Amino acid sequence: MLIEHLRERSDLGVITATTLKSLGVSNPWRRCEPGGPWQRMHPGVVLLHNGPPTRDQQVTAALLRAGPGAVLTGAEACRRHGLPASGTEIHVLVPGFARGSGALILERASPVPASTDVTGFPVVSAERAVVDACRQLRSIDAATALVAAAVQRGRCTPESLAGEARTNRYGTKLVRAVLKELGRAESVAERDARRLSRRIRLTTPHWNVPIADADGLVIGRPDAWFDDVGLAWEIDSKAFHHGPRDYERTLARNSRYAAAGILVLQTLPSRLRDDPDAVARELKKAHRAAAARPRPPVCIVRLDHPSASGDPPRKSNR
């Protein structure tokens, strides 16, 4: 009967030692000894079984350790927002002093930012979560991937992220560098493409520029445009094709390229990363093939031209 009552008073099987003592368990730590039925999650926090805790139980234990008013941020909050953040740490913002350990980061915040209930937990905004997650990263590629995902999935805008980084400047050098680079390259894959094109000396100054046909209709905005031969290079990630509409837009884009006589090379980001030499050979061959036929009657649209904001307004995988 006692264990049933304890489980009812717990949160997902996680409970504080203070609550246990108030319910008549005078020495809960004895049951947390090796071979015992319970386990100690953090100082003052107990899990009412001795098996591996679920992620939700780990987060619950972290919030109980942090105390009232604590909110979830960082990589775990990003994942709750549907973003592919790396890192196993649980980062919690608290209104007062608290000491974390191991994979638990307890950080004092004054004031504690507003939160909303996401999957049953108090989670900060996507902007704050992304900025705090980037503060724990050391890789520019990992930070770029997270920021790009947040923007491309509509969770944040570059402006809202920049505003959060200005408000919370401590440790935000990496995310500010990524945001500065975002205007030139929207993803890790695009930056890899630029590096590869420079390495093989097949460079172009035209990235993400609108291309129009002879009638002035905007055809698309290729990742790279080799204007001398009329070759479009698209870095198409499966991660950005969330449903049938995205797939249909990609097919429509390719149909416009074909109708205008534009050769297009499509490359997956994973191949850029894992097999850049093969991609380099394909790009060289595509460039030679484009140069071997008459250049199609297409042109780059000036950014101040009215059609620059016409159909399509943006790439299908952005």
Image (cartoon, grey):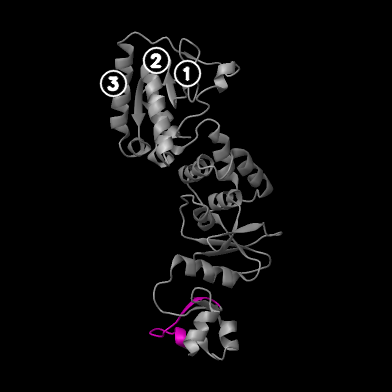
Which residues are the magenta region?
A: 31-43
Label 2 belongs to which residue?
260
Q: Earlier in the sequence, mark 1 or mark 3?
A: 1
Q: Which numbered dot is residue 285?
A: 3
Residue 175 position (above or below residue 103): above
Report crowding for label 1: few under 14, some 14 to 19, many 20 or more residues within 10 A (C-alpha): many
Label 1 belongs to which residue?
211
Residue at mark 1 to residue at mark 3: CA–CA distance: 22 Å
Tell me if label 3 and label 2 are in contact, CB under 8 Å. no
Q: Identify the residue shown where x is 39% and y is 35%.
A: 247
Residue type at numbered disc 2? Ala
Q: Earlier in the sequence, mark 2 or mark 1?
A: 1
User: Which of the two residues, 228 or 15, is positioned nearer the viewer here?
Assistant: 15
| Percent x, y of residue 106 | 59, 64
Which of labels 2 and 1 is toward the front?
2
Residue type at numbered disc 3? Lys
User: Which of the two residues, 91 or 5, is positioned nearer the viewer here?
Assistant: 5
